[in-house]
Image: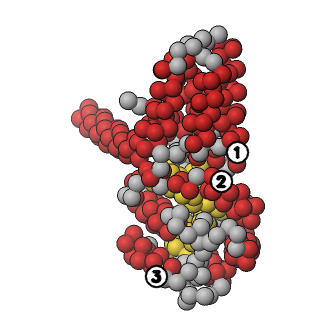
């Protein structure tokens, strides 16, 4: 009995060690992926604070310029600066150097109620993935599929992007790489019909996660936006008992244009969450703060690199720590 418990305790310790190493690995990837934003945006802010001496209006004007250049957005920038001024008054802060920690706290507070990751429940979950061409939609789908397949879940893909040439073949290639089945028809087929078939197949196979790809489109193409609405209606009609989520994939490098895309897609299909890709490719990671504050749509996932592990659940505390870490 004693040996059994000793063995069990050793196993638990080993498991904790593995989990700790994985967590450190994820955080290391996050830090590396956010290095451009840290080296440009955050370092500019902290340098401004450390070199300014006394707090004055000129300091706040310079801070405003840095924030807007980092894609924090005008509305969010104004809000942040107003809150900083209030903290200065409330806490009787006079030295600019003291603002670094206050700025970090205010950023953290802005993001704090943010949801983290996809909410996959028991039974059938349907993830409808939308976004424009070039945002990384297909690779995001593949990474999500790989994640949940590795967790032992039954995953199925639906090739609902019947508009773009070779989109079906591209998804098939990813399906083979990841090792998940795909429901597809020919190019030019009705995307809603593909979705219908995929839902029936998901039920028959007792699938836990059905990921529905859709045509990557410009948000200005009204006919294609109408097609998205039709796909959403089919899902709602044919899978009443399933948990359905609409995930919008946005490219962080497009800055404020991503905000415009999000508004239009949200009006069309009621977006439940955002996957923000290519954060490693931009120094303007302030877009994360702008999306949260101005749109109110949860950022579920962030992409900080090419590997599957680089698509991470968005965790506000870790995001802020990675930006401000030494």
Residue 201, quarter of picture: bottom right
Q: Which residue is rendered at x = 59% and y = 30% of the image?
A: 62
| In front of the other: 27 or 196 | 27
- The residue singled out by tag 1 in the image is 294
For the C terminus, the quadrant is top left
Quickly name the residue at label 2: 259
Q: Secondary structure at mark 3?
A: helix
> Element type at marker 1?
helix
The image position of residue 299, as x and y in percent, is: 59, 49
Q: Nearer the viewer, residue 183 or 140?
A: 140
Q: CA distance from mark 1 to mark 2?
A: 9 Å
In-front residue for pair 190/261: 261
Q: Which mark is residue 169?
A: 3
Inter-mark Cα distance, 2 to 3 = 30 Å
In this rendering, would 80 be left or right of 48?
right
Name the N-terminal-most of marks 2 and 3.
3
In percent of the image, x 67 and y 50: which residue is there? Answer: 297
Indicate which label's residue lies in the foreground, 2 or 3.
2
Determine the residue positioned at 68% across, 41% down. 74
- Measured along the vertical axis of the image, is residue 224 above or below residue 149? below
Label 3 packing within 10 angstroms: few (<14), some (14-19), many (20+): some
Residue 79, given in percent of the width and then of the height, sits at 70, 33
């Amino acid at each position: 009995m004693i040996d059994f418990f000793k063995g069990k305790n050793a196993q638990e310790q080993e498991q904790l060690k593995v989990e700790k190493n994985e967590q450190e690995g994820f955080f290391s990837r996050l830090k590396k992926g956010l290095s451009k934003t840290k080296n440009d945006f955050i370092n500019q802010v902290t340098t401004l604070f450390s070199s300014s001496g006394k707090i004055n209006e000129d300091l706040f004007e310079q801070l405003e310029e840095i924030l807007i250049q980092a894609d924090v957005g005008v509305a969010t920038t104004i809000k942040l600066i107003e809150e900083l001024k209030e903290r200065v008054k409330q806490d009787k802060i006079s030295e600019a150097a003291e603002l670094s920690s206050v700025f970090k706290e205010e950023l953290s507070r802005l993001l704090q109620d943010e949801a983290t990751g996809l909410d996959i429940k028991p039974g059938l979950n349907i993830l409808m993935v939308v976004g424009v061409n070039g945002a990384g939609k297909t690779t995001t789908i593949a990474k999500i599929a790989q994640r949940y397949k590795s967790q032992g879940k039954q995953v199925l893909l639906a090739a609902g992007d019947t508009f773009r040439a070779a989109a079906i073949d591209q998804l098939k290639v990813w399906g083979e790489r990841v090792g998940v089945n795909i429901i597809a028809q020919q190019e030019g087929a009705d995307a809603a019909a593909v979705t219908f078939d995929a839902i029936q197949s998901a039920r028959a196979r007792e699938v836990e996660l059905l990921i529905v790809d859709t045509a990557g489109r410009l948000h200005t193409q009204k006919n294609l936006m109408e097609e998205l609405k039709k796909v959403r209606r089919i899902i709602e009609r044919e899978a009443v008992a399933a948990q359905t989520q609409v995930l919008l994939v946005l490219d962080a490098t497009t800055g404020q244009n991503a905000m415009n895309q999000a508004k239009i897609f949200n009006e069309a299909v009621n977006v439940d969450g955002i996957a923000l890709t290519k954060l490693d490719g931009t120094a303007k990671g302030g877009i994360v703060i702008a999306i949260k504050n101005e749109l109110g749509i949860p950022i579920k996932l962030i992409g900080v690199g090419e590997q599957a592990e680089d698509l991470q659940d968005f965790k506000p505390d870790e995001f802020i720590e990675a930006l401000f870490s030494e």
